[in-house]
Image (spheres, grey):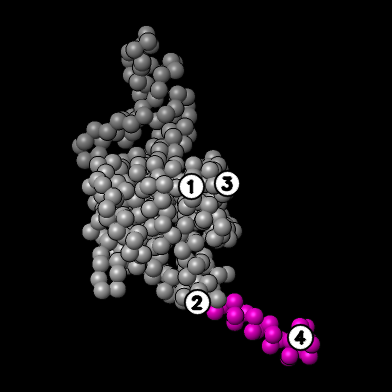
Amino acid sequence: MLVLFRRHTKACPHRSRSYRKCSCSIWLDWRVNHKRIRRPLNLRDWGLAQQRARQIESEGLGATVVPQTIDQAVEKYLQDCQDRDLRPSTTKKYRSHFKRLHEYSAEHGYVFLSQITADVLRSFRQTWNLSPRTSQKRLELLKTFFRFCLDSDWITASPAKALKPPKISMSPVVPFTEDEITKILANCKGRLLLLARLLLSTGLRIGDATTLTRDKIQKDASGYSVHLRTAKSGTTVQCPIPNDLAEAIIALPGPNPFWSGTSKPETVSGDYRLQFSKAFKRAHVVGHIHQFRHSFATRLLLTGASVETVSALLGHQNITVTQHSYAAWTVARQQRLADAVRKSWHASGTPETR
């Protein structure tokens, strides 16, 4: 059974837990398997606190599942993410998202998972000020979290299942033009220039390129190639690079070509993002660093490379991702579309203009 009590502040003249007329915060007190648990209800109104306590008893402690607070469930989920060897940056991002859920729950007096319904999550989503794509990713995280809670027998159904994802319009892929690439390279020097050439030659993500170690640059009878396992998708990438570029990167001083090895990977990639942003401004080019990857892919497609080849070189886990992103740049596809239009002219009797 839940017990309500006032937890008085030092400034409050009252000390009795049963005193109800002050404005000190109201807490919950209960036992599970003879273990005493106390949690703040984040309410100050005694009548509202009694209603919330009865709701928790009927939907939470009185249910057949193991009662679990929201904060406890979040911590166990994040621990599970660490046990699955997710990247620290990913876990850090998850923790930031769940911090917002904690703040929303605290503001509205929600303590137990059983109190989180589909309507509560819809109201929570209305507080987001995010782009549709970011909103979709956060919703996917919520759905994954509540599936974890469901599998752990803490809830009987996932409240996030009823939420529909936002409509997302695919942004067109915009690579750098050859003139823009020339200007950017002219405004890069030293390591930054070599990193820019590496990104253009391999299509690596900035995080993989900046943490590249020398042993990942290997030489065989045909020349140098980069061999590594990508951090984001975990796929193996093998891509040739020009010999002069490989030798210049290997010759760079330090434990690793672009990284000291002591700082966090996200820190070093962030530093290079800032340096590239300054280089773009000097070159009077509007763009972002991921356009190096787009330029690598579109150069291959425009020279006749297959989507399968480009997908393997980019390290995509699914070729569908490559097809959606770069379909407009596939030479074979454009040729088929053009041939289909020309055939329609002859079928309809429309004369072909020359």
Amino acid carrying mark 4 in the image: Glu
Give coordinates of residue 72: x percent, y percent. 31, 41
Q: Earlier in the sequence, mark 4 or mark 3?
A: 3
Disc 3 from disc 2: Cα separation: 31 Å
Q: Earlier in the sequence, mark 1 or mark 3?
A: 1
Residue 338 forms part of the magenta stretch = yes
Crowding around mark 3 (Cα neighbors within 10 Å: few <14, some 14 to 19, many 20+) is few
Which residue is found at the position 37% from the left and 10% from the top?
A: 11
Which residue is found at the position 78% from the left and 90% from the top?
A: 349
Secondary structure, mark 1, is loop
Disc 1 from disc 2: Cα separation: 30 Å
Amino acid carrying mark 1 in the image: Asn
Of labels 3 and 2, the one closer to you? 3
Crowding around mark 1 (Cα neighbors within 10 Å: few <14, some 14 to 19, many 20+) is some
Amino acid carrying mark 3 in the image: His
- Give the overall secondary structure of the magenta segment: helix
Q: Which residue is mark 1?
A: 187
Q: Report the magenta residues as a range.
A: 332-354
**Label number found at residue 352:** 4
Residue contact between numbered discs 1 and 4, judged by CB atoms under 8 Å? no
Residue contact between numbered discs 2 and 4, judged by CB atoms under 8 Å? no
Give coordinates of residue 88: x percent, y percent. 30, 46
Give coordinates of residue 29: x percent, y percent. 31, 30
Q: Earlier in the sequence, mark 1 or mark 4?
A: 1
Q: Earlier in the sequence, mark 1 or mark 2?
A: 1
**Label number found at residue 304:** 2
Crowding around mark 4 (Cα neighbors within 10 Å: few <14, some 14 to 19, many 20+) is few
Amino acid carrying mark 2 in the image: Gly
Quadrant of the rendered structure where residue 93 is? Answer: top left
Q: Nearer the viewer, residue 231 or 227?
A: 227
Secondary structure, mark 2, is loop
